[in-house]
Amino acid sequence: MSKKRNIKILMIIISTLFVLLMLVFPLASVLVNSFSKGLEFYFNSLKTEYFFSALGLTCIVTFITVIVNSFFGIIASYLLTRYSFAGKHILATLIDIPFSISPVIAGLAFIMMFGRLGWATPIIDTINSITGWNIKIVFAIPGVVLATIFVTFPFVSREIIPVLNAVGTDEEEAAAIMGASGFTIFRKITFPHIKWALAYGVVLCSARAIGEFGAVNALSKTRGMTFTLPLEIDALYLSGSSDSIVAAYAVSSILVLVSVILLVIRNILEYRSDRIKISVEERAEIKED
Amino acid sequence: MIKEKNKEQNNKRKKRHGSIPGFGLSMGITLTMLSMLVLIPLASILLYGLSLSPSEFFAIVCSDSVRYALRTSILCSFIAATINCVFGMIIAWTLVRYNFFHRRLIDGLIELPFALPTAVAGITLSKMYSNTGIPGKWLSAIGIDVSYTHLGIVVALIFVGIPFVVRTVQPVLQKFDYQYEEAAHILGAGRIITFIKVMLPELMPALLTGFGLAFARGMGEYGSVIYISGNSAKDHTQVVSYVIMQKLNYMDYAGATAVALVMLITSFVILMVINLIQIKQSKRTNNV
Amino acid sequence: MYIELKNVNKRFGDFQATKDISLDIEKGQLVALLGPSGSGKTTILRMIAGLEMPDSGDIVIDGKRVNDIPPVQRRVGFVFQNYALFRYMTVYDNIAFGLDIKKMDKKAIKARVSELLELTELTGLEKRYPNELSGGQRQRVAFARALAPEPGLLLLDEPFAAIDAKVRKELRQWLREMIHKVGITSIFVTHDQDEAVEVADQIIVTNNGQIEQSGTPFDIYKLPQTAFVAEFVGNPVFVKNYNCLRGFTDGDYDYYIIRPEFVEAFKSDNIHFKEIIDFSQKGIIKDIMFCGNMLQVSIDVAGQEVVTHRSMERRSISVGEEMNVIIYRVFAVSGNEVTLLENSFLKEMDLTGRNREKYLYSDDGYFAG
């Protein structure tokens, strides 16, 4: 008995130490470093034009990314769980590709498509010359948005697919028999099942979109114009003076705050969806008896 | 006649996809978005890669800097993923089996690396483990340099990889039937034998999947690694992502594409292996 | 005929779910599709509903070919195996769903739903969610939901599978009464022969994607037409070496199927059987199983094991005891053919009328003590 208890205590200590050293320390370290030159310096480094430009762009990019990927995620997961068709597994694997690809390659992909040597560049040029627009993709905001969408592409569908699989298709078939249209079925039957998973996917997608660095780094060169917050941090950090390094930490502290908030929301969502699940099962059991 | 034909087509379509309406629309949207946003851009790399002659390709891939970068990335990702398997297993076990005061806190914090921007993690880890930070100061006092060495890369990859292992092992452990352990126990197996002979084989697919995911992430990682690695060609502390980015900055598109292709192939192999493991796993559980 | 299937084929990948099936169902009937799992019965049901499309063949409902008609226009109600109640809707909203879709007037919906709630004795539960109901209540909601749009045909997929054994018995009765009260043509799928016999007006037995036999429960039970049906219903035992059974030594068959009620076992001093005791043969009791309201007795007769039921009111018996055994009749199987064979000795005695009753349904325990 006491041997079992010792193991338990040992395991808890190892886990706690690992989380503390590997995860919490870096977090604390950001905060300590960001305040190392005093409060005034901290707030001054958050008042630069560069910072506001990066903050604004990060918000815009994250917003567009979340909208696009949620739309895609809902439809793709509906497709993959509600219909049978040839090549389903291949499609599912293709959707997951961005997960296993270096973000730098995502950046490269858009450069090879829309950049100086890209095959789509002449097409864009033609459109520009006909319409008189000036669409630029690489090293401009559209490129940043595209790259961010690419790296977070499967985030929402991945959260929804298991839920839809677990729920099964009975309810939708029952509704279809009674003559409900595809949209009505989705709105009244499917959506209530996936709303928590969707919220969950949106949180993960936002977290990754806000923090995306590698892909955006390849496609964005103009500080103050096309830089997101992570790029701004990179620029400050690499400029090397001790002042700018501390400023980099100050900007980082904002992102730390955001990611901690997202983490808390994520946990609340998980807790809520778990609680609903458990209560349904428990009640079902009680009534069955 | 046309109506008849329409009916026939309608019938055929339904025959294949079941009774819930909306197949065509959702298939159309999914394929269009997937192609526009992921597949066509990726194919652009391939397209450009095909214009390279084999000798050009191999000259780039076999150059010293690329070879060393590949070796560094593979080696460090492998070590980090292995360490993560050990600690991930311990943490998942602790979270599932024991109830303690700060369990929810630990559970929530595990996903911090998913939520924290990699660049932030990168600059912080780099500072912490340099010889002016804590614990870097103490470590360098006993002769261990972490920042700007291979060790630094491993530390960064442990950071980004740990949630993958914990989050794949945890659900399997949760579903694990206590009866297995109890059955083994009644048959006279000790705790360690029970773990090795009964639990580990059950957990192996999840553990391997977690390993694969952490390894794949490590291979492609950029933001959290580049600050701590030092990026010195001489010390072989450049990772593959950094090499691609460097070539891009020098407008060496041929070089960047060639290295990217090697990485793409690696990721596909990893993805396939993970899929195979999962298919095998689901087959086994279905048979029980 | 209200429902007709003509040469219907359906294949899922390598699996042929139905092979060239044809069947007819009359209006107003309560029909059971009975068969083991994988026999194609659920596929037939889903094809009638329009949830699956046949690869070839016609499905006709009320004189109209419905192959190309979507489920809702076929006017079918469907009760799913796990009921498929909408978990995020109340009982009221579940039942009203089909009417809402039809854009029915709110007042009319309310009237129809309350009518159904009353019919299914669910009044007062309309604000509950499915997870707050018992298994039986859920089934009734599913039933009411399927009936709400006034379908011409009600389809039920294993309607009792998700309910525990005790409640199941009650619900069978309830469902049978309810369906007859509503007067709707209904088809239900089951793998349980007792359920089919108890509930249905007509039984269609399926096996390997084909229909084995179709008829009243009585016909299916008494006059099985294929080896499969004879084996599937009535708790039979199989006897290969049948030449050693007295009264059945002739004929050339593959094997015999003997049901418990075909076998009579009595003690040698039982006066009720003294006329026919000469035609009996000795058997040793191998096993006695208590089945709640009777005993199931296994007897070794000349090396063949047969099973009979014994009333609890008769004299007690014990394992190893010698009994006199008479087998009244057997199903003789050769290939897929089934022939009913009567005991040749008893046939000669011309046991008709009162005499026959006496031998076939004896209750010697009452008189012999």
Image (tube, coloured by chain):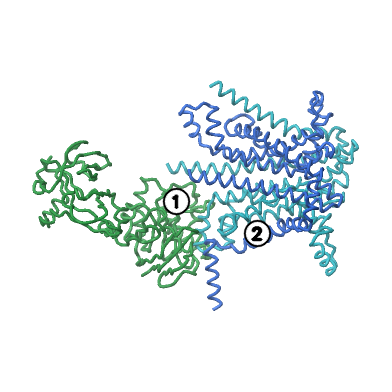
Chain colours: A cyan, B blue, C green
Q: Is residue A254 visible?
A: no
Tell me the quarter of the picture where residue A20 sits: top right
Disc 2: which residue: B30
The quarter of the image holding the N terminus of chain C is bottom left
Asked if labels 2 and 1 touch by Cβ distance under 8 angstroms, the answer is no
Numbered disc 1: secondary structure: helix
**Residue C287 spot, x, y in % from top left:** 25, 38
Q: Residues within 10 Å of mark 1 (few under 14, many from 20)?
A: many
From this view, report whether residue B21 is shown above or below residue B217: below
Q: Position of residue A71 (x, y in %)?
A: 67, 56
> Residue flagged by tag 1: what amino acid is it?
Arg
* Residue C193 on image: x %, y %: 33, 53
Q: Position of residue C29 (x, y in %)?
A: 34, 63
Q: How many marks?
A: 2
Q: Mark 2 falls within which chain?
A: B
Tell me the distance, in whole angstroms, between the alpha carbons under discs 1 and 2. Answer: 37 Å
Which of label 1 and label 2 is nearer to you? 2
The amino acid sitting under disc 2 is: Thr
Q: Residue at x 68, y 39 (%)?
A: B111
Q: Is residue C271 above or below residue A7?
A: below
Q: Quadrant of residue A89?
A: bottom right
Direction from residue C258 to residue B9 in the image, left or right: right
**Residue C138, numbered circle:** 1
Q: Are marks 1 and 2 on the same chain?
A: no
Residue at the extreme right of the image, as rendered: A241
